[in-house]
Image (cartoon, rainbow, N blue to C red):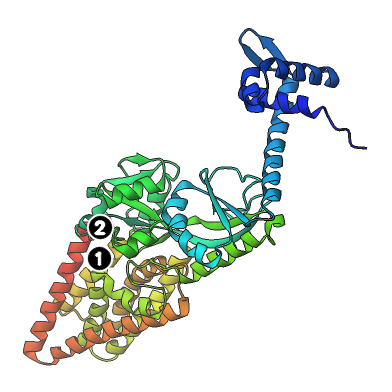
Amino acid sequence: MRRIPYLNGVRAFEAAARGGSFAAAAKELNVTPAAVSRMVRLLEQRLGVSLFVREANRLALTPPGRSYQAGLTPLFDALASLTDQVRTLGANPVLTVGVGPTFAIRWLIPRLADFAKVAPQVDVRITTGGVAAPFSDDWTCGIKLGSGAWPGLVSQALFAADLTPVCAPRVAARIKTPAALRNETLLRVAHAPDDWPRWLAAAGVAKLSARGPVFEYYGHALQAAADGVGVAIGIRPYIDDDLAAGRLIAPFSLSVPKGEQWYLVFRELRREEPAFRAFAQWITLCLAASPAFAHTGEGPGGFIAGLSHPVFGPDHVVAMVAVGLWGAFLGQPAIVLLPVTFPLVMAFGGVLGILGVPLPATEIGIALSAIVLGLMVALAARPPLWIALVLVGAFAIFHGYAHGRELPDDANAVAFAAGFVIATGLLHLTGIAFGLLARWPAGEIAVRVGGCVIAFVGAFYLGAAL
Protein backbone atom coordinates (compact mmCIF):
# COMPACT_ATOMS: atom_id res chain seq x y z
CA MET A 1 0.00 0.00 0.00
CA ARG A 2 1.39 3.43 -1.02
CA ARG A 3 1.97 5.74 1.98
CA ILE A 4 0.86 9.21 0.86
CA PRO A 5 2.45 12.06 2.87
CA TYR A 6 0.65 15.12 4.18
CA LEU A 7 0.52 16.82 0.75
CA ASN A 8 -0.49 20.31 1.92
CA GLY A 9 2.40 20.30 4.35
CA VAL A 10 4.79 18.93 1.72
CA ARG A 11 3.76 21.64 -0.72
CA ALA A 12 4.11 24.36 1.92
CA PHE A 13 7.56 23.07 2.96
CA GLU A 14 8.87 22.90 -0.63
CA ALA A 15 7.71 26.42 -1.41
CA ALA A 16 9.21 27.80 1.82
CA ALA A 17 12.51 25.97 1.27
CA ARG A 18 12.74 27.16 -2.32
CA GLY A 19 11.68 30.74 -1.52
CA GLY A 20 13.72 31.02 1.67
CA SER A 21 10.83 32.16 3.91
CA PHE A 22 7.29 31.45 4.98
CA ALA A 23 6.27 34.83 3.52
CA ALA A 24 7.51 33.89 0.04
CA ALA A 25 5.71 30.54 0.25
CA ALA A 26 2.51 32.26 1.45
CA LYS A 27 2.56 34.60 -1.54
CA GLU A 28 3.02 31.69 -3.95
CA LEU A 29 0.31 29.54 -2.33
CA ASN A 30 -2.08 32.43 -1.72
CA VAL A 31 -2.34 31.82 2.05
CA THR A 32 -0.97 33.59 5.12
CA PRO A 33 2.59 33.07 6.45
CA ALA A 34 1.07 31.72 9.66
CA ALA A 35 -0.84 29.08 7.70
CA VAL A 36 2.37 27.99 5.97
CA SER A 37 4.15 27.77 9.32
CA ARG A 38 1.37 25.61 10.79
CA MET A 39 1.36 23.24 7.80
CA VAL A 40 5.16 22.82 7.95
CA ARG A 41 5.05 22.24 11.72
CA LEU A 42 2.40 19.53 11.27
CA LEU A 43 4.50 17.89 8.53
CA GLU A 44 7.54 17.86 10.85
CA GLN A 45 5.48 16.20 13.56
CA ARG A 46 4.26 13.50 11.20
CA LEU A 47 7.75 12.87 9.82
CA GLY A 48 9.39 12.97 13.25
CA VAL A 49 12.23 15.24 12.08
CA SER A 50 12.92 18.98 12.05
CA LEU A 51 13.09 20.39 8.51
CA PHE A 52 13.92 23.99 9.41
CA VAL A 53 15.99 25.76 12.02
CA ARG A 54 13.85 28.80 12.79
CA GLU A 55 15.96 31.87 13.47
CA ALA A 56 15.13 35.54 13.70
CA ASN A 57 14.04 36.81 10.28
CA ARG A 58 15.32 33.73 8.47
CA LEU A 59 14.86 30.03 7.89
CA ALA A 60 17.72 27.56 7.62
CA LEU A 61 17.28 24.04 6.31
CA THR A 62 18.42 21.18 8.47
CA PRO A 63 20.31 18.33 6.75
CA PRO A 64 17.09 16.24 6.48
CA GLY A 65 15.26 19.31 5.21
CA ARG A 66 17.91 19.96 2.60
CA SER A 67 17.73 16.37 1.34
CA TYR A 68 13.92 16.46 1.30
CA GLN A 69 13.77 19.70 -0.66
CA ALA A 70 16.38 18.47 -3.17
CA GLY A 71 14.10 15.57 -4.03
CA LEU A 72 10.78 17.39 -3.85
CA THR A 73 11.47 20.33 -6.19
CA PRO A 74 12.15 18.15 -9.28
CA LEU A 75 9.04 16.11 -8.45
CA PHE A 76 6.84 19.19 -8.32
CA ASP A 77 8.40 20.49 -11.55
CA ALA A 78 7.68 17.18 -13.26
CA LEU A 79 4.13 17.18 -11.89
CA ALA A 80 3.54 20.68 -13.26
CA SER A 81 4.91 19.65 -16.65
CA LEU A 82 2.76 16.51 -16.73
CA THR A 83 -0.29 18.56 -15.85
CA ASP A 84 0.41 20.96 -18.72
CA GLN A 85 0.81 18.05 -21.13
CA VAL A 86 -2.47 16.46 -20.07
CA ARG A 87 -4.24 19.81 -20.26
CA THR A 88 -3.10 20.28 -23.87
CA LEU A 89 -3.93 16.76 -25.08
CA GLY A 90 -7.26 17.96 -26.37
CA ALA A 91 -5.69 21.03 -27.97
CA ASN A 92 -2.65 21.48 -30.23
CA PRO A 93 0.38 19.24 -29.56
CA VAL A 94 3.19 21.05 -27.73
CA LEU A 95 6.84 20.92 -28.81
CA THR A 96 9.36 22.21 -26.25
CA VAL A 97 12.90 22.38 -27.67
CA GLY A 98 15.87 23.02 -25.37
CA VAL A 99 18.82 24.65 -27.13
CA GLY A 100 21.72 26.95 -26.44
CA PRO A 101 21.08 30.66 -27.05
CA THR A 102 23.47 30.94 -30.01
CA PHE A 103 22.02 27.90 -31.77
CA ALA A 104 18.52 29.26 -31.22
CA ILE A 105 19.33 32.71 -32.61
CA ARG A 106 21.62 31.76 -35.48
CA TRP A 107 19.97 28.61 -36.80
CA LEU A 108 16.70 27.45 -35.26
CA ILE A 109 14.63 30.63 -34.91
CA PRO A 110 15.27 31.82 -38.51
CA ARG A 111 13.80 28.49 -39.70
CA LEU A 112 10.77 28.25 -37.41
CA ALA A 113 8.53 29.81 -40.07
CA ASP A 114 9.41 26.89 -42.35
CA PHE A 115 8.54 24.42 -39.61
CA ALA A 116 5.20 26.19 -39.07
CA LYS A 117 4.37 25.58 -42.74
CA VAL A 118 4.81 21.81 -42.44
CA ALA A 119 3.37 21.47 -38.91
CA PRO A 120 1.00 24.42 -38.31
CA GLN A 121 -0.86 22.52 -35.59
CA VAL A 122 2.21 22.26 -33.31
CA ASP A 123 2.57 24.77 -30.46
CA VAL A 124 6.34 25.50 -30.41
CA ARG A 125 8.15 26.56 -27.26
CA ILE A 126 11.87 27.37 -27.33
CA THR A 127 13.82 27.32 -24.08
CA THR A 128 17.50 28.23 -23.88
CA GLY A 129 19.97 27.31 -21.21
CA GLY A 130 23.31 26.77 -22.89
CA VAL A 131 24.95 23.58 -24.14
CA ALA A 132 25.94 22.56 -20.60
CA ALA A 133 22.40 22.93 -19.22
CA PRO A 134 20.87 19.67 -17.90
CA PHE A 135 18.14 18.09 -19.99
CA SER A 136 14.82 19.12 -18.43
CA ASP A 137 11.96 16.65 -18.05
CA ASP A 138 9.53 19.08 -19.65
CA TRP A 139 11.55 19.29 -22.88
CA THR A 140 10.23 17.34 -25.83
CA CYS A 141 13.74 17.26 -27.24
CA GLY A 142 16.96 19.23 -27.28
CA ILE A 143 19.89 20.00 -29.56
CA LYS A 144 23.27 19.46 -27.93
CA LEU A 145 26.93 19.57 -28.95
CA GLY A 146 29.03 16.66 -27.76
CA SER A 147 29.97 13.03 -28.23
CA GLY A 148 26.42 11.71 -28.51
CA ALA A 149 26.58 9.82 -25.20
CA TRP A 150 24.19 11.22 -22.59
CA PRO A 151 22.76 8.81 -19.99
CA GLY A 152 19.01 8.35 -20.31
CA LEU A 153 18.81 10.14 -23.66
CA VAL A 154 18.55 8.95 -27.26
CA SER A 155 20.82 10.91 -29.61
CA GLN A 156 20.46 11.36 -33.37
CA ALA A 157 23.40 12.91 -35.24
CA LEU A 158 22.63 16.19 -37.02
CA PHE A 159 25.47 18.52 -38.04
CA ALA A 160 29.23 18.27 -38.13
CA ALA A 161 30.74 20.93 -35.88
CA ASP A 162 33.51 22.04 -38.24
CA LEU A 163 35.70 25.05 -37.45
CA THR A 164 36.95 27.69 -39.87
CA PRO A 165 37.95 31.36 -39.44
CA VAL A 166 35.39 33.94 -40.58
CA CYS A 167 35.45 37.71 -40.82
CA ALA A 168 33.88 40.70 -42.53
CA PRO A 169 34.52 41.01 -46.31
CA ARG A 170 36.77 44.05 -45.89
CA VAL A 171 38.94 42.14 -43.40
CA ALA A 172 39.07 39.04 -45.61
CA ALA A 173 40.43 41.12 -48.50
CA ARG A 174 43.74 41.62 -46.71
CA ILE A 175 44.20 38.05 -45.41
CA LYS A 176 46.00 35.90 -47.98
CA THR A 177 47.55 33.10 -45.89
CA PRO A 178 47.03 31.62 -42.41
CA ALA A 179 50.31 33.19 -41.30
CA ALA A 180 48.78 36.62 -42.02
CA LEU A 181 46.45 36.06 -39.06
CA ARG A 182 49.27 37.16 -36.76
CA ASN A 183 48.49 40.72 -37.86
CA GLU A 184 44.77 40.40 -37.07
CA THR A 185 42.68 40.50 -33.91
CA LEU A 186 41.58 36.93 -33.23
CA LEU A 187 38.23 36.77 -31.42
CA ARG A 188 37.87 33.98 -28.86
CA VAL A 189 35.03 32.19 -27.08
CA ALA A 190 35.42 31.61 -23.34
CA HIS A 191 34.05 28.06 -23.23
CA ALA A 192 35.92 26.93 -26.38
CA PRO A 193 39.60 27.77 -25.75
CA ASP A 194 40.86 24.92 -27.96
CA ASP A 195 39.15 26.04 -31.18
CA TRP A 196 41.83 28.44 -32.41
CA PRO A 197 44.81 26.22 -31.46
CA ARG A 198 43.14 23.25 -33.20
CA TRP A 199 42.64 25.16 -36.46
CA LEU A 200 46.02 26.94 -36.40
CA ALA A 201 47.84 23.62 -35.89
CA ALA A 202 46.02 22.10 -38.86
CA ALA A 203 46.91 25.16 -40.95
CA GLY A 204 50.61 24.72 -40.18
CA VAL A 205 50.94 27.83 -38.00
CA ALA A 206 50.73 26.24 -34.56
CA LYS A 207 53.20 28.77 -33.11
CA LEU A 208 50.72 31.58 -33.73
CA SER A 209 48.78 32.43 -30.56
CA ALA A 210 45.21 33.68 -30.64
CA ARG A 211 45.08 37.03 -28.85
CA GLY A 212 42.02 39.22 -28.80
CA PRO A 213 38.74 39.85 -26.98
CA VAL A 214 37.08 36.91 -25.25
CA PHE A 215 33.30 36.50 -25.59
CA GLU A 216 30.89 34.39 -23.57
CA TYR A 217 29.09 32.94 -26.59
CA TYR A 218 29.93 32.11 -30.21
CA GLY A 219 27.13 34.43 -31.28
CA HIS A 220 28.85 37.43 -29.68
CA ALA A 221 32.17 36.64 -31.37
CA LEU A 222 30.52 36.13 -34.77
CA GLN A 223 28.66 39.43 -34.50
CA ALA A 224 31.93 41.18 -33.64
CA ALA A 225 33.54 39.55 -36.69
CA ALA A 226 30.70 40.72 -38.94
CA ASP A 227 31.21 44.25 -37.58
CA GLY A 228 34.90 44.18 -38.54
CA VAL A 229 36.32 43.87 -35.01
CA GLY A 230 38.50 40.91 -35.96
CA VAL A 231 38.53 37.30 -37.12
CA ALA A 232 36.37 34.76 -35.26
CA ILE A 233 36.63 31.01 -35.32
CA GLY A 234 33.33 30.00 -36.87
CA ILE A 235 31.52 26.76 -36.10
CA ARG A 236 28.88 25.09 -38.22
CA PRO A 237 25.97 25.58 -38.48
CA TYR A 238 26.22 28.99 -36.79
CA ILE A 239 27.99 30.51 -39.80
CA ASP A 240 25.94 28.97 -42.63
CA ASP A 241 23.43 31.79 -43.10
CA ASP A 242 26.01 34.57 -42.76
CA LEU A 243 28.27 32.92 -45.35
CA ALA A 244 25.36 32.48 -47.74
CA ALA A 245 24.36 36.14 -47.35
CA GLY A 246 27.94 37.42 -47.62
CA ARG A 247 27.89 39.03 -44.17
CA LEU A 248 30.84 36.82 -43.26
CA ILE A 249 33.64 35.45 -45.43
CA ALA A 250 35.72 32.34 -44.79
CA PRO A 251 39.14 33.45 -46.13
CA PHE A 252 40.57 29.91 -46.13
CA SER A 253 39.24 26.64 -47.48
CA LEU A 254 40.61 24.68 -44.52
CA SER A 255 37.81 23.41 -42.27
CA VAL A 256 38.80 21.42 -39.18
CA PRO A 257 36.53 19.03 -37.22
CA LYS A 258 35.94 20.25 -33.66
CA GLY A 259 35.93 16.68 -32.38
CA GLU A 260 32.25 16.92 -31.41
CA GLN A 261 28.96 16.89 -33.29
CA TRP A 262 25.47 18.34 -33.00
CA TYR A 263 22.79 15.89 -31.91
CA LEU A 264 19.02 15.86 -31.59
CA VAL A 265 18.44 14.36 -28.11
CA PHE A 266 15.24 13.11 -26.53
CA ARG A 267 13.87 10.60 -24.06
CA GLU A 268 12.62 7.33 -25.54
CA LEU A 269 9.10 7.91 -24.22
CA ARG A 270 8.84 11.02 -26.47
CA ARG A 271 9.62 9.19 -29.72
CA GLU A 272 6.02 8.61 -30.79
CA GLU A 273 4.65 12.01 -29.79
CA PRO A 274 3.16 13.73 -32.87
CA ALA A 275 4.98 17.02 -32.19
CA PHE A 276 8.35 15.30 -31.86
CA ARG A 277 7.83 13.16 -34.97
CA ALA A 278 6.98 16.26 -36.99
CA PHE A 279 10.03 18.15 -35.72
CA ALA A 280 12.42 15.21 -36.25
CA GLN A 281 11.21 14.74 -39.83
CA TRP A 282 11.49 18.46 -40.54
CA ILE A 283 15.01 18.86 -39.17
CA THR A 284 16.10 15.81 -41.18
CA LEU A 285 14.86 17.54 -44.34
CA CYS A 286 16.78 20.67 -43.28
CA LEU A 287 19.96 18.58 -43.13
CA ALA A 288 19.44 17.38 -46.68
CA ALA A 289 19.08 20.98 -47.90
CA SER A 290 21.85 22.44 -45.74
CA PRO A 291 24.90 23.83 -47.64
CA ALA A 292 28.30 22.40 -46.74
CA PHE A 293 30.21 25.70 -46.87
CA ALA A 294 33.41 23.91 -45.96
CA HIS A 295 34.90 25.42 -49.12
CA THR A 296 34.01 29.08 -48.93
CA GLY A 297 31.42 29.56 -51.58
CA GLU A 298 32.28 26.47 -53.62
CA GLY A 299 28.89 24.87 -52.93
CA PRO A 300 28.27 21.25 -51.96
CA GLY A 301 31.28 18.98 -51.50
CA GLY A 302 30.88 16.97 -54.71
CA PHE A 303 32.39 16.84 -58.20
CA ILE A 304 32.19 20.59 -58.88
CA ALA A 305 33.80 21.41 -55.52
CA GLY A 306 36.60 18.93 -56.22
CA LEU A 307 37.09 20.29 -59.75
CA SER A 308 37.29 23.91 -58.57
CA HIS A 309 39.14 23.32 -55.30
CA PRO A 310 42.76 23.26 -56.60
CA VAL A 311 42.42 26.58 -58.43
CA PHE A 312 41.44 28.47 -55.26
CA GLY A 313 45.00 28.39 -53.91
CA PRO A 314 47.62 30.11 -56.10
CA ASP A 315 50.40 28.37 -54.17
CA HIS A 316 48.91 25.01 -55.16
CA VAL A 317 48.30 26.09 -58.74
CA VAL A 318 51.88 27.19 -59.46
CA ALA A 319 53.33 23.99 -57.96
CA MET A 320 51.07 21.75 -60.02
CA VAL A 321 51.85 23.70 -63.19
CA ALA A 322 55.57 23.52 -62.30
CA VAL A 323 55.42 19.70 -62.19
CA GLY A 324 54.17 19.56 -65.79
CA LEU A 325 56.55 22.33 -66.85
CA TRP A 326 59.61 20.57 -65.44
CA GLY A 327 58.51 17.22 -66.86
CA ALA A 328 58.22 18.71 -70.34
CA PHE A 329 61.57 20.45 -69.90
CA LEU A 330 63.26 17.14 -68.96
CA GLY A 331 61.58 15.24 -71.79
CA GLN A 332 60.86 11.50 -71.91
CA PRO A 333 60.19 9.66 -69.64
CA ALA A 334 59.94 12.48 -67.07
CA ILE A 335 57.18 14.22 -69.05
CA VAL A 336 54.95 11.25 -68.15
CA LEU A 337 56.37 10.02 -64.83
CA LEU A 338 56.43 13.35 -62.95
CA PRO A 339 52.75 14.25 -63.60
CA VAL A 340 51.76 10.67 -62.73
CA THR A 341 53.87 10.49 -59.56
CA PHE A 342 52.54 13.74 -58.14
CA PRO A 343 48.83 12.77 -57.85
CA LEU A 344 49.65 9.22 -56.73
CA VAL A 345 51.80 10.39 -53.82
CA MET A 346 49.42 13.28 -53.18
CA ALA A 347 46.68 10.69 -52.55
CA PHE A 348 48.83 9.26 -49.74
CA GLY A 349 49.18 12.74 -48.23
CA GLY A 350 45.43 13.22 -48.58
CA VAL A 351 44.80 10.09 -46.51
CA LEU A 352 47.10 11.43 -43.80
CA GLY A 353 45.17 14.68 -43.79
CA ILE A 354 41.77 12.98 -43.61
CA LEU A 355 42.97 10.81 -40.72
CA GLY A 356 44.27 13.90 -38.92
CA VAL A 357 47.86 12.64 -38.69
CA PRO A 358 50.02 15.67 -37.73
CA LEU A 359 52.28 17.01 -40.47
CA PRO A 360 54.26 20.05 -39.28
CA ALA A 361 54.94 23.06 -41.49
CA THR A 362 52.45 22.13 -44.21
CA GLU A 363 52.20 25.65 -45.62
CA ILE A 364 56.00 25.96 -45.61
CA GLY A 365 56.32 22.68 -47.52
CA ILE A 366 53.83 23.86 -50.14
CA ALA A 367 55.65 27.17 -50.57
CA LEU A 368 59.02 25.40 -50.86
CA SER A 369 57.61 23.14 -53.58
CA ALA A 370 56.93 26.16 -55.78
CA ILE A 371 60.38 27.64 -55.05
CA VAL A 372 62.36 24.44 -55.68
CA LEU A 373 60.42 23.29 -58.75
CA GLY A 374 60.44 26.80 -60.18
CA LEU A 375 64.20 27.05 -59.71
CA MET A 376 64.71 23.65 -61.33
CA VAL A 377 63.07 25.05 -64.46
CA ALA A 378 64.67 28.49 -64.23
CA LEU A 379 68.18 27.00 -63.88
CA ALA A 380 67.51 24.32 -66.53
CA ALA A 381 68.48 21.69 -63.97
CA ARG A 382 68.56 18.13 -65.27
CA PRO A 383 69.17 15.82 -62.29
CA PRO A 384 68.87 12.04 -62.54
CA LEU A 385 65.27 10.93 -62.97
CA TRP A 386 65.07 9.32 -59.53
CA ILE A 387 66.03 12.60 -57.84
CA ALA A 388 63.34 14.45 -59.78
CA LEU A 389 60.79 11.80 -58.76
CA VAL A 390 61.80 12.02 -55.07
CA LEU A 391 61.50 15.82 -55.09
CA VAL A 392 58.09 15.77 -56.76
CA GLY A 393 56.84 12.97 -54.49
CA ALA A 394 58.04 14.67 -51.29
CA PHE A 395 56.28 17.91 -52.15
CA ALA A 396 53.15 16.04 -53.26
CA ILE A 397 52.71 14.78 -49.68
CA PHE A 398 52.34 18.35 -48.39
CA HIS A 399 49.83 19.27 -51.10
CA GLY A 400 47.79 16.10 -50.58
CA TYR A 401 47.80 16.57 -46.81
CA ALA A 402 46.47 20.13 -47.09
CA HIS A 403 43.66 19.05 -49.42
CA GLY A 404 42.81 16.04 -47.25
CA ARG A 405 42.40 18.29 -44.22
CA GLU A 406 40.10 20.54 -46.25
CA LEU A 407 37.74 17.76 -47.39
CA PRO A 408 34.26 18.61 -46.04
CA ASP A 409 32.81 16.07 -43.61
CA ASP A 410 29.60 15.88 -45.63
CA ALA A 411 31.32 15.69 -49.03
CA ASN A 412 30.76 12.91 -51.52
CA ALA A 413 34.36 11.69 -51.31
CA VAL A 414 34.31 9.76 -54.62
CA ALA A 415 32.81 12.65 -56.61
CA PHE A 416 35.09 15.17 -54.92
CA ALA A 417 38.18 13.05 -55.62
CA ALA A 418 37.19 12.59 -59.26
CA GLY A 419 36.83 16.33 -59.76
CA PHE A 420 40.07 16.99 -57.93
CA VAL A 421 42.08 14.49 -60.00
CA ILE A 422 40.75 15.95 -63.25
CA ALA A 423 41.62 19.50 -62.15
CA THR A 424 45.13 18.40 -61.08
CA GLY A 425 45.66 16.67 -64.42
CA LEU A 426 44.56 19.78 -66.32
CA LEU A 427 47.03 21.91 -64.36
CA HIS A 428 49.82 19.44 -65.15
CA LEU A 429 48.84 19.50 -68.84
CA THR A 430 48.95 23.29 -68.76
CA GLY A 431 52.53 23.10 -67.50
CA ILE A 432 53.44 20.46 -70.09
CA ALA A 433 51.98 22.52 -72.94
CA PHE A 434 53.98 25.56 -71.89
CA GLY A 435 57.09 23.45 -71.26
CA LEU A 436 57.05 22.09 -74.81
CA LEU A 437 58.05 25.56 -75.97
CA ALA A 438 61.54 24.74 -74.68
CA ARG A 439 62.19 22.90 -77.95
CA TRP A 440 62.94 26.31 -79.51
CA PRO A 441 65.55 28.76 -78.20
CA ALA A 442 63.10 31.60 -77.66
CA GLY A 443 60.65 29.17 -76.10
CA GLU A 444 63.29 27.87 -73.69
CA ILE A 445 63.90 31.41 -72.47
CA ALA A 446 60.15 31.87 -71.93
CA VAL A 447 59.93 28.57 -70.03
CA ARG A 448 62.85 29.48 -67.77
CA VAL A 449 61.31 32.89 -67.09
CA GLY A 450 58.13 31.03 -66.18
CA GLY A 451 60.17 29.01 -63.70
CA CYS A 452 61.46 32.24 -62.16
CA VAL A 453 57.89 33.52 -61.79
CA ILE A 454 56.84 30.29 -60.07
CA ALA A 455 59.81 30.47 -57.69
CA PHE A 456 58.97 34.10 -56.91
CA VAL A 457 55.35 33.19 -56.10
CA GLY A 458 56.62 30.41 -53.82
CA ALA A 459 58.98 32.84 -52.07
CA PHE A 460 56.07 35.20 -51.45
CA TYR A 461 54.03 32.45 -49.78
CA LEU A 462 57.06 31.25 -47.83
CA GLY A 463 57.55 34.70 -46.40
CA ALA A 464 53.89 34.81 -45.39
CA ALA A 465 54.11 31.37 -43.75
CA LEU A 466 57.18 32.16 -41.67
- Residue assigned mark 1: 367
| The image quarter in which residue 433 lies | bottom left
Query: For the view shown, which residue lies furthest in the top direction?
Result: 56
Residue at 10% across, 78% down: 449
Q: Which one is in front, 255 or 86?
A: 86
How far is disc 1 from disc 2 in space, using C-alphas? 8 Å
* Residue 365 screen position, x and y as percent: 30, 64
Relative to the observer, which residue lies in front, 388 or 278? 278
Please tell me whether residue 189 is drawn above or below residue 21 in the rendered image.
below
Q: Where's residue 292, x and y in %?
A: 42, 68
Give x and y (percent) for residue 454. 17, 73
Residue that badge 2 annotates: 465
The answer to whether mark 1 and mark 2 are in CB contact below 8 A is: yes
- Which image quadrant: the C terminus? bottom left
Q: Badge 2, how many Cα within 10 Å: few under 14, some, many 20+? A: many
For residue 9, which quarter of the picture? top right
What SS does tag 1 mark? Answer: helix
The residue type indicated by label 2 comes to: Ala
Secondary structure beneath dot 2 equals helix
Asked where in the image residue 54 lies, by quadrant, the reply is top right
* Relative height, residue 452 to residue 120 (above, below): below
Residue at 68% x, 40% y is: 80
Question: From the image, which quarter does the N terminus lie in?
Answer: top right
Locate residue 83 relative to residue 96 in the image: left or right.
Answer: right
Which residue: 62% across, 20% down?
20
Question: On the picture, is 388 further left or further right than 142?
Answer: left
Tag 2 or tag 1, which sits nearer the N-term? 1
Who's the residue at 80% across and 21% down the image? 43
The crowding category of the residue bearing disc 1, from other C-alpha atoms within 10 Å (few below 14, some 14 to 19, many at least 20), is many
**Amino acid marked by disc 1:** Ala
> In the depicted view, which residue is nearer to us: 72 or 115?
115
